[in-house]
Image (cartoon, helix red, strand yellow):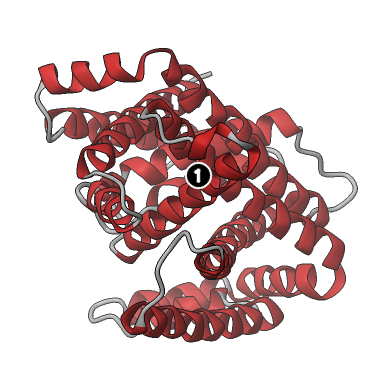
Amino acid sequence: MKWTKQRLNNLFFIIGIVAVVVMLFTFDVSFTELWNHLCHAGYWLIPIIGVWIFIYGLNALSWWIIIKANTSENEHVGWWRVYQLTITGYALNYATPVGGLGGEPYRIVELSRDISKEHATSSVILYAMMHIFAHFWFWFLSIFIYLALVAVGDLPLNKPIGTMLGFIAILFSIAFYLFSKGYKNGLVRKAIRLIGKIPGLKGWSRRFQERHAQSLENVDRQIAALHAQERRAFYSSLLIEILSRIVQSSEVFFMLLLFGIDGGGTFGGLTIVYLHSILIVSFTTFLANLIGFLPMQLGVQEGGFVVSIAALGFSAALGIFVSIICRVREIIWIVIGLALMKK
């Protein structure tokens, strides 16, 4: 059977629907408890869910900059089209195991309706790299946010914490080096060769490289060109992606305010609470990405929120509340993303 773009779209849609059904039936709280948490959130649900309109807008802008820098003059993709694919892509990433196995192939298939398949592939890979690269920078910057809060006497610093922060800093420095190598030399052909080392896939890897040698070389060349020749686009995209993580922290900030945690209501107090929100999101996303093979990181995200919130001196009940409301927000946006697939 020939897999047309429409059939692939239907396949991704069905996978998303099945994943949502599974997640709803495996929600680890009773309906009564869930309803009580939603009632507690009340009107705060509006900004908690609504802020993702702006977060996805920033993600789309970051990707759009990469697309514009990576395509020819006669190729054009509108920003609304990129915004739609951003939401649907993340919906599939949330819903499917090993995140990017759902969203990235879908984006390539859909974007190739507007531009060449090579440019679509390289643009999607470049944005996926940028998204991960920005994650590492966000986590790295969180180390200095923690140290700043230590300096003002808000958080503790002992030998175990200092050792952990130092280890993480070294780990991220290695990651930055690997990313720089990938951006300078491309990584698609290396990734295909690496897949060939998996038992049973050596023959497929060899045939794929032989069949698509020129296309793989072109994609790697386009990846390298963005970093080497389009530095303004590269760093603009990176900064916007990092900004989206900072804006994402506002949903946790809203929930802290809902629980009466406002640092006294002064500008300085609210700033410290927002920095706490950044640290909570940073630790939780770091943990969730370490174990990214579970749909929506079931159980991992919840544990990350509870542990990170407790580590900052807040109650476990707050951690449970934040994790449940964030899970509800994810399901709502997954449904929106799946609906946009059929628009």
Position of residue 26 relative to residue 151, above or below, is above
**Mark 1, other Cα within 10 Å: few <14 / some 14–19 / many ≥20:** many
**Label 1 sits on what residue type?**
Val
Query: What is the quadrant of residue 266 in the picture?
Result: top right
Residue at 24% across, 78% down = 200
Position of residue 145 relative to residue 46, above or below, is below
- Badge 1 marks a residue whose secondary structure is helix
Number of numbered discs present?
1
Work out which quarter of the rendered image holds the N terminus and state it: top left
Task: Tell me if 248 is positioned left or right of 115 in this view.
Answer: left
Position of residue 54 relative to residue 117, above or below, is above
Residue 47, given in percent of the width and then of the height, sits at: 51, 22
Q: Name the foreground residue: 20 vs 163.
A: 163
Q: Residue beneath label 1, please?
A: 273
Q: Name the foreground residue: 302 vs 109.
A: 302
Residue at 82% across, 58% down = 233
Task: Tell me if 219 is positioned left or right of 89 in this view.
Answer: right
Q: Is residue 196 visible?
A: no
Residue 267, given in percent of the width and then of the height, sits at: 64, 38
Task: Tell me if 293 is positioned left or right of 234 in this view.
Answer: left
Residue at 21% across, 44% down = 316
Residue at 47% across, 47% down = 277
The residue at the far right in this view is: 73
Q: Is residue 271 visible?
A: yes
Residue 247, given in percent of the width and then of the height, sits at: 59, 42
Q: Name the foreground residue: 37 vs 234.
A: 37
Residue 306, given in percent of the width and then of the height, sits at: 25, 49
